[in-house]
Amino acid sequence: MQISVLFLLLLLFSNINAEFDKEKLSIYAGEASYSDKAQWQIPKQIPYPKDNPLTKEKIKLGKELFFDPRLSKNNDISCSSCHNPKYGWSDNRAKSIGDQNRVGRRNSPTVINSAFLQNFFHDGRAKSLEEQALGPIESEVEMNIKLDELVEKLKRIKKYQELFNKAFDDGITKENIAKALASFQRTLLSLNAPFDRWIQGDKDAISEDAKEGFDLFLNKGRCQLCHAGFNFTNERFANIGLGDKSDLGVYEISSDKSAIWYGAFKTPTLRDIEKSAPYFHDGSVKTLKEAVTICGNGGRKPVKIRSPFFRDRKLNEYDVDKIVEFLKTLTSPDIKY
């Protein structure tokens, strides 16, 4: 609810073509400051849909499925191939590699804190973790196996017969595959980063450089206009001036062909961002410093359609370095799973 309220404030304070009203923007920046601790603190409960409550049995099953390459046509690609714990639950490649070494169109996003998201994939085409979980399985450039074929495949494996029967009343179905995978992913939480300890009152949890970086993040950089709240994303979509004309993002899948969707992609979480290079939907940026420079100074290339919040903030190298130090404080200890 916090994120939606902030977004409504942003809509009131601006329009697509106008400059920010400085007085109103300063009011917003104050509300997004570190003094308002509640918006930066991770909720104590994990949200889940009514038809898929979390259980130990589903989480255990989901973990088995997530790391099992038998979920792919040729038994060589698992969910963890693109969402590897070693690389911030991404894959350290510009674009992911799937069945028969096919290269996908986009960079693999992290699944950390996906329990708190409402839009999935870079273009937001899935609206639940359950829906998201099944997409890569049937994709020709990912796991490349039909769901009906996968169901029959799993039914021949004794271990999965037992695990599904413990987790569900109706055994192995494609719906239950989705529910189990989603349940496991909801447990992949970044909860105890240095930033979290600092915002909870530990004054020594982050360095003075990182504190200065957070101030720059909020004020000069206005980064929180897109990277808002505890998950550091407003889940909105924007063209940030990367100049990639081969991939038009939301525009490709939306029935609404308004210019605002042209080349627009979802704002990613910044949680554990230090581990999940390369960056952006096309994986074209190798370092966090370069990513901050692009975002803080209005994009890499001039584009006609750009987010109203995305403009040149005149960040110098000193500013960028401090913001990078802050972003590193969003890295949690290795997630236990």
Image (spheres, rainbow, N blue to C red):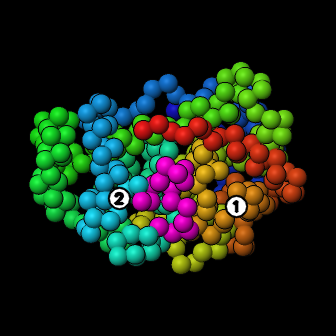
Asked whether 175 or 310 is in front, the reply is 175
Tell me what residue is drawn at x 54 percent, y 54 percent: 87
Question: Is the C-beta separation of discs 1 and 2 under 8 Å?
Answer: no
Q: Position of residue 329 (x, y in %)?
A: 69, 39
Disc with the residue nearer the chain's start (1 vs 2): 2
Residue furthest to the front: 158
Q: Amino acid at mark 1?
A: Thr
Look at the picture and state if 241 lies above or below 329.
below
Label placed on residue 287: 1
Tell me what residue is drawn at x 60 percent, y 75 percent: 244
**Magenta-colored stretch includes residue 242:** no
Asked whether 214 or 207 is in front, the reply is 207
Q: Find disc 2 in the rendering and name its residue.
A: 78
Q: Position of residue 1 (x, y in %)?
A: 52, 32
Mark 2 crowdedness (10 Å alpha carbons): few <14, some 14-19, many ≥20 = many
Magenta span of residues: 81-96
Q: Position of residue 259 (x, y in %)?
A: 56, 68
Tell me what residue is drawn at x 30 percent, y 46 percent: 64
State left or right for residue 74 relative to residue 198: left
Which quadrant of the figure contains the C terminus?
top left
Residue furthest to the bottom: 246
Tell me what residue is drawn at x 32 percent, y 37 percent: 59
Judged by its main secondary structure, the magenta piece is loop
Between tags 1 and 2, which lies in front?
A: 2
Q: Position of residue 311 (x, y in %)?
A: 75, 59
